[in-house]
Image: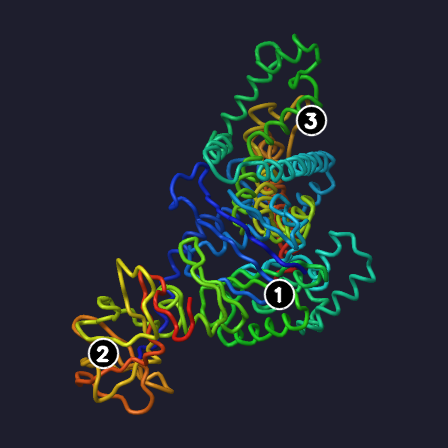
């Protein structure tokens, strides 16, 4: 006789606890804050959806969100094509393969705040190697602490330097998995180098590129440490991305309610864009 | 379509080959007639894929020339040789439809749209893929994918040679014979020179008019399937073709006769000049019979393979296989073996050394 009971459910318990403490409870705390107002002393007043409404109408939020999309858009537009181009030009075998791979992996091994600090010192106009060279040797007016455009160029170049390797390594792995027969068949069929890229390499890279773009989207959309250390969101508010603004509201102004509402909207946007992108990219495969 | 000549071909993957063992192809001289169906047969690593890649232009040989209709193409890249190759794993362009896949080689060569249309539908008809022309090629089954890659080769009507590099490896067994007969049929319809590389003797022998057997970078025999079976020129061909392969027994040659285990064995004819070194008798299991007189042997194992039995008998420590129709003896039985003399060959240092009766070699 087989024993029939529901004790197997206990096996799910550890995962349930982990998810609860790791995600659900913190998340619900934020939800709890987002519908209330507090002035300290653990006193809370019901706000309803007021914070959400206020936030969605706020120019400050719109500006930060706009900057965030611009930042993510620009770095994706640079890192993805650049990453593919570098992966395509890397050697396929021989001594230089490990050299290239290690060189590529190095930037990704550096902690985020160290990256921010490095680029800060590197670009300071009076003492930084790049800053000094630009201003005093080339005579180009370049000061990321004063000029918003220079600040933007700097955070974008920094992110490209830090994270293009991820796209390179994933694309390289994807390229290496294409059997030689494809290239040989293309040669025999008289395909041009562009056709080889368009009809063999790009389709075979689709899966890894989907993952690369997703990872780079999520990471860059949630980026905080590097621009915070480099520019602190300045000059003015010019590089105040969403996460920097969020921390300012939550910890600077101690407006827990609006900050909680903002966190939830922030999270919803990240989730929505990732889901949309992934669904669109994989919908052909299901057929 | 063209006659293909390989002359003094040698190839090594090493930059500075020293001895013969550094060569993947040792010395190849070969003519492939226009419109023939050929098979290149040999075990893995014998150099057959190297040879194929040299003909297609994917590899440049270290030495020697390749001629298509007496035109030297040794230094031409693959797309200028006008050849087609079907690979072990089906190569298709995933994002294209079946139609675009078939049209791809023509479009790359700037063929007019109406000509492409006509050729593609003709080839699709031949391959029986007309119904799937507008579907995405990535969703097809392996055998259909392999048909499409064949189609991409056949779609050019001026193709010099179509080469197949073990094309049935990934095909399900029950579809293999279908595709194999399709290939044979295609050859009869398009009359292009076809070269089929395989290590599977059944595929080679059913497809080809002429089979080229290779071993260790050398051609050991070229012949029709029947010739390879009946008179292997080398013990390797004897082993490799046939199931089970030829019995090869060490023997002693004295006074112009061959002696195995002290017993005189009648051969097909006289022994050629200079039979020194290693001498062996070769006899196919099909021509070994059990009788009351002859070579005494002990039966070790009998395998019933349906239409007949394979009897494995031991003479001293030598195993001899015989194919026996009807009732077979039990294991352990004492029997006598008879070799059919006109099918009994002598091999000297692995090469055929006995002469056929009535034919001076």
Mark 2 / mark 1, whichever is N-terminal? 1
Q: Give the SS element for disc 3.
A: loop
Q: Residue at 63% x, 24% y: name it.
A: A154
Mark nearer the viewer, 1 or 3: 1
Give the image location of residue B343, x and y in percent.
Answer: 36, 77
Q: Residues within 10 Å of mark 2 (few under 14, many from 20)?
A: many
Quadrant location of the N terminus of chain B in the rendered image: bottom right
Chain letter for the residue marked with disc 2 in the picture: B
Q: Camera-side residue: A275 or A80?
A: A80
Real-space Cα distance between discs 3 and 2?
92 Å
Task: Write down the residue under mark 3.
Answer: A238
Quarter of the image for residue A239 reads top right
Co-location on one chain, circles 1 and 3: no
By what rule are the colours in the image chosen? rainbow
Give the image location of residue B198, x and y in percent.
Answer: 48, 64
Give the image location of residue A133, x and y in percent.
Answer: 62, 12
Q: Residue at 70% x, 41% y: name it.
A: A54
Task: Write down the residue under mark 2.
Answer: B313
Task: Write down the residue under mark 1.
Answer: B139
Q: Give the SS element for disc 1.
A: helix
């Amino acid at each position: 006789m087989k024993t029939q009971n529901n004790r197997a459910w206990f096996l799910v318990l550890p995962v349930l606890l982990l998810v609860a403490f790791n995600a659900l409870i913190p998340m619900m705390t934020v939800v709890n804050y987002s519908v209330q107002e507090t002035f300290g002393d653990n006193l809370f007043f019901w706000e309803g959806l007021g914070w959400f409404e206020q936030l969605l109408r706020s120019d400050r939020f719109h500006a930060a969100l706009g900057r965030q999309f611009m930042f993510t858009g620009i770095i994706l537009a640079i890192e993805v094509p650049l990453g593919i181009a570098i992966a395509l030009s890397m050697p396929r075998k021989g001594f230089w393969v490990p050299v290239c791979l290690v060189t590529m992996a190095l930037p990704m091994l550096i902690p985020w705040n160290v990256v921010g600090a490095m680029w800060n010192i590197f670009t300071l106009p009076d003492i930084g190697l790049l800053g000094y060279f630009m201003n005093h040797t080339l005579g180009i007016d370049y000061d990321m602490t004063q000029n918003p455009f220079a600040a933007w160029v700097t955070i974008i170049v920094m992110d490209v330097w830090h994270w293009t390797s991820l796209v390179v390594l994933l694309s390289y792995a994807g390229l290496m998995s294409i059997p030689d027969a494809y290239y040989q068949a293309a040669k025999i069929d008289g395909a041009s180098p562009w056709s080889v890229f368009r009809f063999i390499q790009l389709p075979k890279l689709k899966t890894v590129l989907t993952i690369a773009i997703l990872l780079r989207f999520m990471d860059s959309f949630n980026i905080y440490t590097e621009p915070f250390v480099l520019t602190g969101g300045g000059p003015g508010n010019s590089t105040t991305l969403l996460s920097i603004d969020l921390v300012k509201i939550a910890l600077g102004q101690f407006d827990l309610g609006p900050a909680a509402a903002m966190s939830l909207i922030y999270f919803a946007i990240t989730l929505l864009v990732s889901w949309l992108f992934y669904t669109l990219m994989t919908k052909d495969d299901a057929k | 379509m063209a006659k293909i000549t390989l002359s003094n071909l040698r190839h090594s993957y090493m930059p500075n080959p020293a001895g013969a063992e550094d060569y993947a192809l040792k010395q190849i001289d070969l003519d492939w007639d226009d419109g023939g169906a050929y098979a290149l047969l040999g075990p893995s690593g014998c150099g057959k894929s190297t040879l194929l890649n040299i003909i297609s232009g994917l590899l440049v040989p270290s030495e020697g020339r390749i001629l298509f209709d007496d035109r030297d193409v040794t230094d031409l890249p693959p797309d200028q040789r006008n050849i087609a190759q079907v690979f072990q794993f089906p190569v298709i362009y995933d994002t294209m439809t079946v139609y675009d896949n078939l049209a791809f080689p023509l479009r790359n060569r700037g063929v007019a749209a109406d000509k492409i249309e006509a050729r593609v539908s003709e080839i699709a008809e031949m391959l029986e893929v007309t119904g799937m022309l507008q579907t995405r090629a990535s969703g097809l089954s392996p055998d259909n994918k392999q048909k499409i890659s064949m189609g991409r080769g056949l779609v050019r009507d001026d193709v010099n040679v179509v080469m197949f590099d073990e094309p049935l490896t990934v095909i399900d067994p029950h579809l293999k014979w279908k595709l194999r007969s399709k290939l044979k049929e295609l050859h009869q319809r398009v009359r292009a020179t076809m070269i089929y590389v395989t290590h599977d003797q059944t595929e080679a022998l059913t497809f080809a008019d002429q089979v080229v057997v290779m071993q260790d970078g050398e051609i050991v025999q070229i012949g029709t399937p029947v010739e390879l079976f009946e008179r292997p020129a080398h013990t390797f061909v004897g082993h490799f073709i046939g199931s089970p392969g030829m019995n090869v027994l060490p023997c002693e040659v004295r006074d112009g006769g061959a002696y195995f285990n002290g017993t005189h064995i009648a051969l097909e004819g006289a022994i050629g000049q200079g039979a020194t070194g290693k001498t062996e008798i070769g006899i196919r299991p099909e021509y070994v019979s059990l009788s009351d007189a002859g070579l005494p042997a002990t039966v070790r194992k009998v395998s019933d393979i349906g239409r007949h039995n394979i009897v494995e008998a031991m003479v001293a420590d030598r195993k001899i296989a015989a194919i026996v129709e009807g009732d077979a003896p039990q294991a352990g039985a004492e029997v006598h073996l008879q070799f059919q003399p006109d099918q009994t060959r002598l091999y000297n240092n692995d090469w055929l050394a006995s002469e056929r009766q009535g034919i001076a070699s």
